[in-house]
């Protein structure tokens, strides 16, 4: 579903041949794609390994807030759609892990880093889904923000990441539409249903704006990613695009954006109020409402699946041994 | 304890008859049967394919991109392999 601008470009430079570096940069500048076996600076490899694996972890952890409502969806149609969406998130995680692995870190090492709490995932998934309307809000807003961020990544300089993002983006628009449809239905329903939709918007709006990462002035590390064409737009540019696209959608629903400072300027852009970055920092530091629960759930799931992995490996070994004997 | 490694497979899908199988990505599975099932679930959730191949990644021998100059040089220097190398008068028509 999402990668967040948490990615810190490595400051440590290993000794690399300036001619190699110059050749690499000229390929990037010419919009050539970098493929797994090509020479690349160590920092490019580390930055991408971290960004793609964080993105993969976000997809995997992102199944949890929605998975909580699978057994409580209000109709079979909603349940089937939500199940398909959660399966897609899992699939997106797997495409992304595969892309990250092409940089030379094993799947198991990447997953272990998440389970050990060493790797980050998107802050948004540390918020709870309290009502059914939250499922609508997550699809509409969280996936909407994810799409804004992911479309430029389809042109990322690293080939396997760009290709994975093309697949993800194709599937993501169903997610946003199913979320918006849930909101439309609630907003056309009883007063209580509409109030539930408004409450979900009130709780998800600001965390969604934080998904784009810190303001441009504070994130010095985007520069190198921009130079390498991993990142094509700044955090604030993407955030503004999201706000401009979303406000008319909220108006259509008859809902109010929980921001009294919101005004449209002469160019048609919506100017939003101050974001509470302290809340964002707290979530990143592990102190959000669901941080501990999300990680505990992932660990439990991994441990519960250990016997399946062992059985599959034992069966494959037995079959291979028999084939060799025959 | 670190999670033990599971075999990596490359996945190829034929999207419709008449087209070749095309590489779509990779996945981990303990054996070929499970790799095929996982490929179905991961790469064909929206009717992307009629046929799937899975190949253990370590069975693929790849050329080294660093050698591409030497590897593909013979093709670079043989412009007479292209139809545009030959001059044919316009009034001969399309050939």
Image (tube, rainbow, N blue to C red):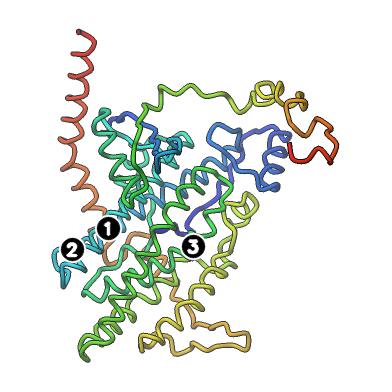
For marks 1 and 2 on the same chain, the one whose residue lies earlier in the sequence: 2
In the image, residue A302 lies at what x, y percent?
A: 22, 43
The chain letter under disc 3 is A
Give the quarter of the image for residue B91: top right
The quadrant of the picture occupied by the C terminus of chain A is top left
Q: Are marks 1 and 2 in contact (CB under 8 Å)?
A: yes
The percent position of residue A66, horizontal first and vertical second, equals 25, 63
User: Residue, x 21% and y 53% (percent of image)?
Assistant: A297
- Disc 2 target residue: A70
Which residue is at a point 40% across and 36% down the rendered structure image? B12
SS category of the residue bearing label 1? helix
Q: Which residue sits at x=14%, y=68%?
A: A72
Same subunit: marks 2 and 3: yes
Residue occupied by mark 1: A86
Quadrant of the image occupied by residue A304: top left
Judging depth in this view, the residue of A277 and A110 nearest the camera is A110
Q: Earlier in the sequence, mark 2 or mark 3?
A: 2
- Residue B2 visible to an observer of this rendering: no
Depicted A97 relative to depicted B69: above or below: below
Residue farthest toward the top in the current orientation of the protein? A325
The residue beneath circle 3 is A149
| Label 2, residues with CA under 10 Å away: few <14, some 14-19, many ≥20 | some
């Amino acid at each position: 579903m999402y990668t967040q601008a948490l990615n810190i470009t490595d400051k440590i430079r290993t000794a690399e041949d300036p001619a190699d570096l110059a050749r690499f940069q000229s390929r990037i500048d010419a919009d050539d794609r970098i493929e797994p076996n090509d020479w690349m600076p160590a920092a490019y490899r580390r930055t991408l390994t971290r960004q793609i694996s964080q993105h993969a972890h976000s997809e995997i952890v992102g199944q949890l807030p929605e998975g909580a409502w699978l057994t409580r969806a209000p109709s079979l149609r909603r349940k089937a759609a939500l199940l398909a969406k959660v399966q897609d998130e899992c699939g997106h995680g797997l495409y992304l892990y595969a892309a990250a692995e092409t940089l030379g870190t094993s799947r198991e090492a990447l997953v272990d880093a998440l389970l050990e709490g060493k790797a980050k995932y998107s802050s948004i998934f540390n918020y709870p889904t309290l009502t059914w309307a939250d499922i609508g809000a997550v699809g509409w807003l969280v996936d909407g923000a994810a799409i804004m961020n992911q479309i430029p990544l389809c042109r990322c300089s690293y080939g396997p990441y760009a290709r994975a993002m093309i697949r993800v983006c194709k599937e993501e628009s169903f997610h946003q539409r199913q979320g918006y449809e849930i909101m439309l239905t609630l907003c056309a329903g009883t007063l209580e249903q509409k109030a539930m939709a408004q409450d979900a918007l009130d709780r998800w709006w600001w965390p969604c704006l934080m998904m784009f990462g810190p303001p441009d002035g504070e994130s010095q590390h985007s520069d190198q990613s921009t130079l390498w064409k991993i990142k094509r737009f700044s955090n604030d540019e993407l955030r503004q695009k999201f706000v401009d696209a979303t406000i008319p959608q909220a108006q259509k629903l008859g809902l109010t954006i929980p921001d009294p400072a919101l005004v449209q300027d002469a160019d048609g852009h919506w100017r939003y109020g101050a974001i509470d970055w302290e809340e964002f920092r707290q979530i990143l530091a592990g102190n959000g409402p669901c941080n501990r629960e999300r990680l505990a759930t992932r660990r439990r799931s991994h441990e519960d699946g250990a016997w399946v992995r062992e059985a599959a490996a034992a069966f494959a070994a037995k079959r291979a041994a028999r084939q060799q004997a025959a | 304890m670190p999670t033990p490694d599971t075999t990596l497979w490359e996945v190829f899908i034929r999207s419709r008859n008449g087209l070749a199988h095309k590489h779509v990505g990779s996945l981990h599975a303990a054996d070929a049967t499970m790799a095929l099932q996982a490929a179905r679930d991961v790469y064909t959730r929206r009717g992307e394919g009629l046929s799937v191949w899975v190949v253990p990644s370590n069975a693929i021998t790849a050329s080294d991109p660093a050698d591409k100059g030497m590897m593909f040089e013979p093709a670079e220097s043989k412009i007479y392999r292209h139809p545009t190398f030959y001059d044919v008068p316009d009034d001969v028509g399309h050939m």
